[in-house]
């Protein structure tokens, strides 16, 4: 287990690796259907790719900083990188074991045979040759005999290559094409047994035959992950949007943060490649025979068997699904939505109604990550074409979604909307929508405040809450937030909304202190928090203080967690679980006991320093009694999960919650909860 943590704070990056271990546990769980296990292998692989592109590159940049300042940022970056490599190697071994010893045999039992080129039958060899000659040969790129003596060899970021040594220090690099499916399904001879191979093996079979004239030639897989940071040197001068656009191509040429290689590659050839690719031994991670397991998201099932979960289709919202007017329903009562258990359609419908409603005068909205094709965004563009005063804040520093946000920003501008792009040194991460209507000469305001992005695609995969309200106090506060975004106000003096970086930390601290005061007075102190990540040391210290005062603290943390629970005199009253299941837990909920009159909030902010200090986040109170009851009951369901919940202990061992209670899988129970609500 990791050693780079102390009794107060678990290292954030090592904790993230423990989260990805929970993903790997789902791949290992034979209680999951076979293709669900394969999906979790793909998620694990995709997560790890991003980790090396983002977090490992950040640590390496810290190594370049002078030691006095470095100590304030992170301790012993070389030690951290070493421990990361140790943990990744352990997980990669487990990954390989699951795939080879469990997944492949289970596929075979279902009549699906994942074969290597060494196992091709004579007929399959002919089919592989035909596919290569007619399709692949025309599109592959081969770098023949690059010499390490003259220049370094460049390979593209996150692309797959096959490498083979010819003689001395000369070798071949073959880029595996992305225009063809990663998997090739051979025609079945009996409709009972199906043989599938990687496109890698089709290439290996043909290329090894092609180069065999020079002697035995073995091809091995390699892949490089490169630094994904854009490194804008000066965000405060010039046009930041243009600087980001100009920097995007650098991702493909950034410093290597990891090179994945086939462990069977001879050491001599490995050294030649390291030299040619300008990477160090610390960059080398021994993967398996194949890389880019995220391609298993599209692994074919040529059988008629149900080997994956049936989709839980989003349920209709009991009020908003078929109503004549979303505005009319919000006027009657606040409306709460919970994706993906409930449909995201009401949010789209709200914007479509706003686009065509003649009483709507103003629409303001933040967009952090947008879907590529989006009915919601189409409604925004229509609103501006219809003469509404539309203002959209596009966060173009949303990593890996910059290009898509640029695209939609241009579309909005063309339709007549005012588009504001990223500000220097701060991200706008809030999920907020503000609408004004003028009815009989009076202004009526509406707000939507959510925990997740305005994105139809992720709304089917991420669990999130959204509140629609016309409450005058909340809408007045939200208008101030948009005045800040439009630079008409410097500090939003909000009374009800918690807004980072202005009041969120202060208000949450005060709420924790209130629970401490209750516990100190002999009353019950209670804090329940659900979030993606918990990393901010000041807020963690507040929770330790509350624990020592006797406050009961229950945490639902999906990802990284730097808080160390269960330490006597520090955190023995803090209990943490993490749920990894078919949906990505993404909603942020904050509950404070308040001596029985519970205070409940939802919003976009994790308790990470970046969310509290370096981003614009919005957190709203939930006042409606029905909605408070719903969210509280949903929290209870998650806290009682004894199927997919893991205990986050001081060493983050990820042991499953197991007890004598009736099995409860919270995500399925939550779906049933909403299903029963519409019966």
Image (cartoon, helix red, strand yellow):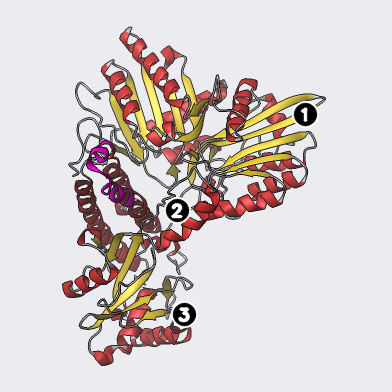
Circle 3 — which element?
A: helix
Looking at the image, residue 490 lies above or below residue 346: above
Pointer 2 or 3: first along the chain:
3
Give the x, y percent position of residue 609.
Answer: 38, 34
* Closer to viewer: mark 2 or mark 1: 1
Q: Is residue 271 above or below residue 620?
A: below
- Quadrant occupied by the C terminus: top right
Q: Does residue 578 appear to the left or right of 462 in the view shown? A: left
- Residue for point 45% across, 21% down: 507
> What residue is drawn where x is 31% and y is 66%?
104
The answer to whether residue 465 shows anywhere in this view is yes
- Measured from the top left, where is residue 265 in percent x and y? 21, 72
- The residue that disc 3 covers is 139
The image quadrant of residue 308 is bottom left
Residue drawn at (72%, 50%) of the image: 415
Which residue is the site of mark 2? 309
Give the main secondary structure of the magenta stretch.
helix
Q: CA distance from mark 2 to mark 3?
A: 36 Å
Q: Earlier in the sequence, mark 3 or mark 1?
A: 3
| Residue 265 visible to an observer of this rendering | no
Q: Which residue is mark 1?
A: 438
Of the two numbered discs 2 and 1 on the same chain, state the one appearing first in sequence. Answer: 2
SS class of the residue under badge 1? strand
Q: Position of residue 383 (x, y in %)?
A: 73, 44
| Structural crowding at the residue carrying mark 2, measured as other residues with C-alpha within 10 Å and reported as few (<14), some (14–19) or many (≥20) | few
Q: Which quadrant of the structure image shows residue 127?
A: bottom left
Q: Which quarter of the rendered picture does the N terminus lie within?
A: top left
Left or right of 343, for residue 579: left
User: Start and end of the magenta stretch?
Assistant: 57-72
**Is residue 16 located in the magenta-colored stretch of the structure?**
no
Distance in Å between CA atoms under marks 3 and 1: 59 Å
């Amino acid at each position: 287990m990791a050693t780079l943590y102390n009794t107060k704070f678990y290292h954030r990056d090592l904790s993230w690796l423990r989260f990805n271990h929970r993903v790997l546990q789902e791949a290992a769980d034979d209680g999951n259907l076979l293709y669900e296990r394969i999906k979790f292998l793909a998620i694990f692989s995709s997560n790890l790719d991003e980790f090396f592109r983002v977090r490992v590159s950040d640590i390496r940049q810290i190594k370049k900083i002078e030691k006095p300042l470095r100590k304030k940022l992170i301790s012993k970056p070389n030690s951290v990188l070493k421990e990361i490599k140790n943990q990744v190697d352990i997980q990669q071994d487990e990954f390989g074991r699951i795939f080879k010893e469990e997944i492949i045999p289970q596929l075979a039992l279902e009549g699906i045979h994942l074969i290597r080129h060494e196992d091709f039958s004579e007929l399959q060899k002919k089919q592989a040759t035909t596919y290569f000659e007619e399709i692949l040969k025309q599109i592959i790129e081969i770098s023949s005999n690059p010499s390490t003596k003259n220049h370094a060899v460049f390979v593209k970021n996150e692309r797959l290559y096959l490498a083979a040594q010819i003689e001395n220090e000369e070798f071949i690099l073959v880029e595996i094409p992305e225009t063809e499916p990663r998997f090739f399904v051979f025609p079945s001879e009996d409709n009972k047994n199906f043989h599938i191979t990687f496109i890698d093996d089709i290439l290996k079979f043909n290329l090894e035959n092609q180069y065999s004239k020079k002697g035995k030639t073995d091809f091995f897989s390699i892949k490089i992950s490169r630094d994904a940071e854009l490194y804008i040197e000066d965000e405060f001068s010039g046009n930041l949007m243009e600087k980001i656009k100009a920097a995007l191509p650098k991702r493909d040429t950034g410093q290597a943060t990891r090179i994945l290689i086939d462990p069977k590659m001879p050491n001599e050839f490995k050294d030649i490649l390291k030299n040619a690719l300008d990477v160090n031994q610390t960059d080398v991670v021994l993967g398996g025979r194949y890389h880019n397991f995220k391609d298993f998201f599209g692994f074919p099932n040529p059988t008629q068997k149900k080997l994956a979960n049936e989709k839980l289709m989003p349920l209709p919202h009991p009020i908003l699904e078929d109503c004549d007017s979303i505005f009319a329903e919000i006027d009657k009562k606040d409306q709460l939505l919970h994706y993906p258990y409930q449909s995201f359609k009401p949010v789209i419908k709200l914007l479509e109604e706003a686009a065509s409603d003649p009483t709507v005068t103003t629409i303001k909205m933040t967009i952090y990550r947008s879907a590529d094709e989006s009915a919601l965004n189409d409604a925004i563009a229509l609103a501006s074409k219809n003469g509404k005063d539309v203002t959209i804040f596009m966060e173009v520093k949303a990593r890996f979604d910059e290009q898509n946000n640029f695209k939609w920003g241009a579309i909005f501008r063309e339709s007549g909307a005012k588009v504001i792009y990223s500000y220097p040194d701060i991200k706008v991460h809030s999920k907020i929508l503000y609408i004004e209507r003028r009815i009989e000469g009076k202004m009526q305001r509406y707000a939507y405040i959510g925990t997740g992005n305005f994105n139809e695609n992720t709304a089917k995969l991420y669990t999130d809450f959204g509140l629609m309200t016309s409450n005058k106090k909340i809408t007045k506060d939200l208008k101030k937030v948009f005045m800040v975004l439009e630079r008409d106000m410097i500090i939003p003096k909000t009374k009800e909304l918690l807004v980072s970086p202005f009041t969120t930390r202060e208000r949450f601290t005060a709420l924790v202190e209130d629970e401490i005061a209750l516990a100190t007075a002999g009353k019950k102190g209670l804090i329940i928090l659900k979030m993606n990540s918990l990393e901010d040391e000041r807020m963690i210290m507040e929770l330790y203080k509350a624990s020592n005062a006797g406050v009961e603290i229950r945490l639902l943390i999906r990802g990284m967690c730097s808080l160390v629970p269960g330490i006597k005199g520090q955190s023995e009253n803090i209990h943490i679980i993490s749920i990894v299941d078919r949906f990505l837990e993404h909603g942020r909920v904050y509950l404070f006991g308040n001596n029985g009159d519970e205070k409940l909030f939802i919003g976009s902010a994790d308790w990470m320093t970046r969310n509290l200090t370096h981003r614009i986040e919005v957190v709203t109170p939930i006042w409606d009694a029905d909605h408070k009851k719903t969210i509280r009951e949903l929290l209870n369901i998650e806290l009682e999960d004894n199927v997919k919940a893991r205990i986050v202990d001081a060493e983050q061992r990820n042991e499953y919650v197991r007890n004598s209670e009736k099995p409860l899988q919270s995500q399925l129970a939550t779906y049933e909860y909403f299903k029963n609500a519409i019966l």
